[in-house]
Amino acid sequence: NHRLAGGFHPFPFHVTNALLHGFNGILVWLLVGAIFDKAVLSERVRAFRPLFVYGLPLLFVVSPIQTESVAYISSRSEVLSATFYFAGMLAFVRLRDRNPWWTAVAVMLCFVGAAMSKQDKLTLPFAVLLLDYLLMSGCDWRGLKKSWPMYGLFGAGIVAGFFVVVRPFLFAKTAGFSLDWREYLFTQFRVVFRYMRQVLVPIGLNVDPDVPSSQSLGDHLSWLALLGLLALVGAAVWFHKRAPLATFGLLFFLLVLAPTTTFFPLADFAAERRLYIPVFGLYLAALWLMTRVFEPGATGARWALAGVVALYSVGTFQRSAVWGDEVRLWSDAVAKSPNKERPWTWLGRAQYTTGNIPQAQISWNRASELVEKGSEQEAFLLGNLGLMEAQAKRWDQAIGYYSRALAIKPNETTLWAQLAVAQIRAGRAEEGWQTFDKGEKAWAVISPQYHFLRGQEYFQIGEYAKAAADFQIALNAHPDDEETRRNLEIAKRAAGIP
């Protein structure tokens, strides 16, 4: 509950995310240690145990690619789902040889927690299957029989999870079903390699990357990316008995990414937060490569890893500073995605909230040039521009922007209220009150902001009881809004309401 966490102040949310991230690092440390204790590994790989047990958690914790997941409050679901995901894998490795039923129950509980935290984490059963076959069973299918109760529960859980978790996800606003699934899939062939580069060489990170779409395999060399993916998977399968650890790492990376990089279109082609769990697999494969380059006991491997950790730490510190300042974050996005509308929109919002109105207007005007005409996003931009004109008391210009926004989104009651206020301020009071009436009939659900704005106008004309009624509705929707609470108290006193 946000009230228990200190209201809407972001600091407690950031602290919680950071603590969860640190805890996930501990889980990774325990998981890698358990794998080296229980798994079937070559003597050469075992000779590099400290490199994996200490190096992989450090890479996981300090990599700059994790900054978005930890710093972005809305990415709490990624970080929390990872806690259940890694806990499930750890429970499997630790309990597998003790009691198959307790193993099944423990892993199943973690599976439910991961899937409920983030819908796309239904891949946990398949990750455990990979772990079981490649590492715990020594690439022998007969070893899977030991865990048959768990796989039986997984089967039922996957079916239930599809109806309870996946179906709502398919109709969520984050889904990009305006996109053709083939366009999304062809683009993702390239995005997977973008992700690999960002995990291993995390430079040029961007909160809102502008990824060109591939409407066919011929666009932007998507066919070549597909061939590359097939070659990687083919090599992993071909060499899985000789390099099971590397195979597990690569296939784990691709598996956890699969729900967001295959047939289900999302609104964004790429997002760094989607890599929070998959980095585990790619770093595992990268460390395995180091065991082929360096000899056991050589200090070169430790120094190379220490250098990477140091560079990652500096990069994370710098990236965290960018995320710590909203204007800086979106200025960075605009510099890297200059022809994408959304970074300009959010830069304008950040500039507006910090009082830099002229720059906000420049950013929003640029966004309006790039936005898809007739889209909800254009209505949002026009509403923002109207609000800016209203604050400058240029009422006619504000009325023009609000009217254009309503032509696109006529069911937005807040826009109706803002238009009504602008008309009243422009000396067109009768028209303004008619607009309020139209807004109330425009949609079954009226926004709290509509009631707040109308309450202010009622108060201005001495209709204190009506003003109090509107402020009460607005306060019911946002109980923590002190401005609304003060306005309600003043209106009640003026109306003589106890």
Image (cartoon, grey):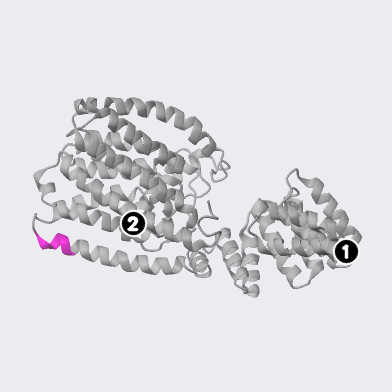
Magenta range is 298-303
In the displayed structure, does residue 132 sit left or right of residue 48?
Answer: right
Residue 462 is labelled as 1
Query: Is residue 302 rendered magenta in the image?
Result: yes
Labels 2 and 1: the sequence-earlier one: 2
Point out the residue furthest to the front here. 498
Name the residue located 60 percent from the left edge and 62 percent from the top edge: 345
Q: Which residue corresponds to mark 2?
A: 22
Q: Is residue 168 above or below residue 75?
A: above
Secondary-structure class at tag 2:
helix
Q: Position of residue 363 (x, y in %)?
A: 61, 68
Relative depth, front residue between 144 and 3:
3
Q: Is residue 449 above or below residue 108?
A: below
Q: Are there few (<14), some (14-19), or many (20+) residues within 10 Å of tag 2?
A: some
Residue 94 is labelled as none
Q: Position of residue 46 (x, y in %)?
A: 12, 47
Q: Is residue 167 above or below residue 308?
A: above
Q: Is residue 133 above or below residue 494?
A: above
Q: Quadrant of residue 310?
A: bottom left
Q: CA distance from mark 2 to mark 1?
A: 56 Å
Query: Is residue 18 rendered magenta in the image?
Result: no
Q: Position of residue 281 (x, y in %)?
A: 29, 47
